[in-house]
Image: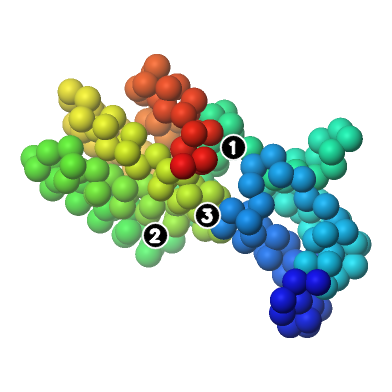
Amino acid sequence: MAPNAGAQMTDIHAAAPNGKLRDLIEQAILTGDFGPGEKLEEVALAQRFGVSRTPVREALHQLSAAGLVESRPRRGAVVATITPERLVEMFELMAKLAARRLTPETEVAIVEAHKACKAALAKGPDAYYYENERFHFAIYAASRNGFLIEQATALHRRLKPYRRLQLRVRNRVAASFDEHAAIVDAIRDGKAKKAATLIRDHISVQGERFADLMASLPSLKAG
């Protein structure tokens, strides 16, 4: 049993056992304790968190439904690997959720971030890069989905060097700002499907450069 497993067991059973256990396993995945493709043994997890196998099985089922865990033949539950397709789907879903769940506070954050992007236009790609980052994080927050926010933030960090280089492509900053404007309008109007389409086009617009970026994900994760 892992250190402090007794305290963890007390916490787990204090309220909603499966929900708490799910959160603990999710956190271990997000922090890299369990890597992409790694097998998640029910017995080992039960020992680590001081519970029986039944709540572990239920927690893994919930994480599978969320896309964080995959069930594979003859291997059981493994940590899901983020593919380029899944990455795009994740951003599309966040845009949809932002449009559906927008609050006055998150709307202000998105609009202010967009204004900051406009002010940075004349300062060059590097200045715009930081405001562009703020803009995307504002959309993440507006989705109000903790799992997606964690995943998107982690991937955002890994892709930082490539995002900066993409903004140095001729006319890319101005085009990026125009795309932001359309995304903001769709989210504020509550047009979830349109917002998702615009986000997909926004992150895919570089064509082959974007494909190369996605192909580099395995080496970025190893770095």
Q: Nearer the viewer, residue 149 or 73?
A: 73
**Residue 105, relative to residue 156: is it above or below?**
below
Describe the element under mark 1 as helix, strand or loop.
Answer: loop
- The residue at which mark 2 appears reads as 106
Describe the element under mark 3 as helix, strand or loop.
Answer: helix
Considering every residue shown, the one lying at the far top of the view is 208
- The residue at which mark 3 appears reads as 150
- Disc on the earlier residue, 2 or 1: 1
Residue 90 placed where, x, y %?
55, 40
Residue at x 28% of width, y 45% of height = 132
Residue type of the residue flagged with mark 3: Glu
Describe the element under mark 2 as helix, strand or loop.
Answer: helix
Residue mark closest to the camera, 2 vs 3: 3
Residue at x 80% of width, y 40% of height = 71
**Residue 199, relative to residue 19: is it above or below?**
above
The answer to whether mark 2 and mark 3 are in CB contact below 8 A is no
Q: Nearer the viewer, residue 27 or 185?
A: 27
